Image (spheres, helix red, strand yellow):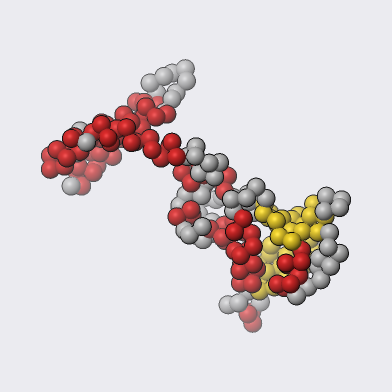
Amino acid sequence: MKIARYTIFVTIVVLAIVLSSAHTEKPVWGFYGHKKINRMAVFALPQEMIGFYKKNIEYITEHAVDADKRRYATKYEAVRHYIDIDHWGKIPFLEVPRQFNDALMKYGQLQLIDLITLDTTNLSLNTVVNEEDRFDPSIAIMNGDQVWHSMKTVAFENFFKAHFKTQYYEDEWIVEGQVYDEIFETDKFASGNKVLRFVDQFSHQGILPYHLESM
């Protein structure tokens, strides 16, 4: 069985190389490549399996592109099909969070928006770990080199999940200032003319396999 799997793998790799170099002027992968690979892979199966798959070879060939067809269904679908993880670091990518919310928060941008002047202030999130509470860290929201607000990390994570992440399929992720003040018992937005916006700067590099978590 190991030999069979190896044979299939080698077949797919060879086909990929051949197909990608078949057109010297404009290399094309496209639907044709996916269909061809599925079809040829059937003939690399061991004798015990080839009978069933050969009977269904047309179905296997035609449905090879189902995933690619789906990626055009909405503007949010394509990023579910890949991740350019090397954009975020190097193997073994220890710095890349394993949880989707953590990745969104780490690489995204929190902004303070003035609704009257439309001025935008970028805020940064800094983790603060003290010896006495190293197992219960805090997060400092920074405006430049000044602390704008601080809280326990778990409190901000819960806020992010409940009020920003729920807007994942919206064009903008906005939280009214009054909501923030009520949750964290502050008067940061007492003037009533400011909101918080979070800009997702992570998803455009792909979210596979993060999207397999509950969204």
- Up-down: is 158 above or below 63? below
Where is 104 relative to 49, above or below?
below
Question: Image quarter for residue 41?
Answer: top left
**Residue 43 place in picture, x, y as percent:** 20, 33
| Image position, residue 86 (x, y; %) | 52, 46
**Which quarter of the picture shows residue 183?**
bottom right
**Left or right: where does residue 47 sit relative to residue 83?**
left
- Can you give x and y, in whole percent of width and height, for residue 117 in the image? 87, 50
**Residue at 36% from the left image edge and 32% from the top image edge:** 34
Nearest to the observer: residue 137 or residue 111: 111
Say which quarter of the image contains residue 49. top left
Q: Is residue 89 visible?
A: yes
Q: Which residue is drawn at the image coordinates 56% and 41% (left, top)?
A: 75
Q: Residue furthest bottom?
A: 132
- Kindly identify the residue that appears in the image at 43 percent across and 18 percent down: 24
Could you tell me which residue is drawn at 83 percent across and 63 percent down? Answer: 192
Spot the residue most to the top.
25
Residue 134 vertical position relative to residue 86 in the rendered view, above or below = below
Is residue 61 found left or right of 123 in the rendered image? left
- Asked whether residue 92 appears in the rendered view, the answer is no
- Count of numbered tags: 0
Q: Is 81 placed left or right of 177 in the picture?
A: left
Q: Give the vertical position of 211 relative to 18 (above or below).
A: below
Q: Percent position (x, y) of residue 108? A: 64, 54
